[in-house]
C-alpha cells in the first residue's frame, strides 16, 4: 500500500515549529517562512502544524530556504 502524501512515516518523529526553531537556532518566524517557501513540508494534525524530523534534517543539510534574499546556513 502506498504512503499517503503528507503522512509521516512510522519511524519519523514529528516536531512542533517551536521545537524545530530551538533545534536549528532560529526563530519560529524563520520556520514559518521556510514552510511558506516550500523548504519544509508541514504535517497538519487537527489545528497543529508539525514538521517531520527527516524534512528538518534535510533542510538543515541543504540550507534553510526562507524565501528571503538568502538561504540560512545552519551550523552543524
Image: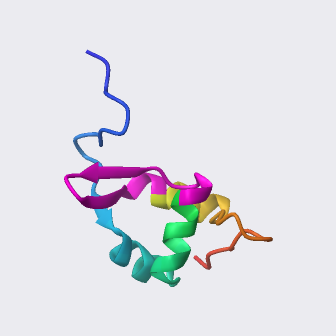
How many numbered marks have been drawn onto this rendered protein structure?
0
Q: Is residue 11 left or right of residue 39?
A: left
Q: Quadrant of the N terminus?
A: top left
Q: Residue at x 36, y 39 (%)?
A: 6
Q: Residue at x 32, y 60 (%)?
A: 49
Q: Is residue 22 left or right of residue 26?
A: left
Which quadrant of the structure image shows residue 75? bottom right
User: Relative to 2, is 23 above or below?
Assistant: below
Q: Residue at x 72, y 68 (%)?
A: 71
**Residue 53 percent location from the top left of the image:** 38, 58
**Residue 45 percent location from the top left of the image:** 22, 52
User: Does the magenta run of residues contain 45?
Assistant: yes
Q: Quadrant of the C terminus?
A: bottom right
Q: Is residue 31 left or right of residue 70?
A: left
Q: How is the image coloured?
A: rainbow
User: Relative to 48, is 45 above or below?
Assistant: above
Question: Which contiguous range is marked in magenta?
Answer: 36-55
Q: Residue at x 35, y 78 (%)?
A: 18
Residue sitting farthest toward the top: 1
**Residue 29 percent location from the top left of the image:** 51, 78
User: Does the magenta run of residues contain 12?
Assistant: no
Which quadrant of the structure image shows residue 48? bottom left
Residue sitting farthest toward the right: 69
User: Relative to 13, is 31 above or below?
Assistant: below
Amino acid at each position: 500500500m502506498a504512503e499517503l502524501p503528507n503522512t509521516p512515516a512510522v519511524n519519523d518523529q514529528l516536531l512542533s515549529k517551536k521545537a524545530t526553531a530551538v533545534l536549528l537556532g532560529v526563530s519560529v518566524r524563520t520556520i514559518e517562512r521556510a514552510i511558506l517557501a516550500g523548504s519544509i513540508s508541514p504535517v497538519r494534525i487537527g489545528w497543529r502544524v508539525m514538521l517531520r524530523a527527516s524534512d528538518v534534517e534535510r533542510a538543515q543539510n541543504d540550507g534553510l530556504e526562507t524565501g528571503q534574499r538568502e538561504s540560512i546556513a545552519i551550523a552543524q
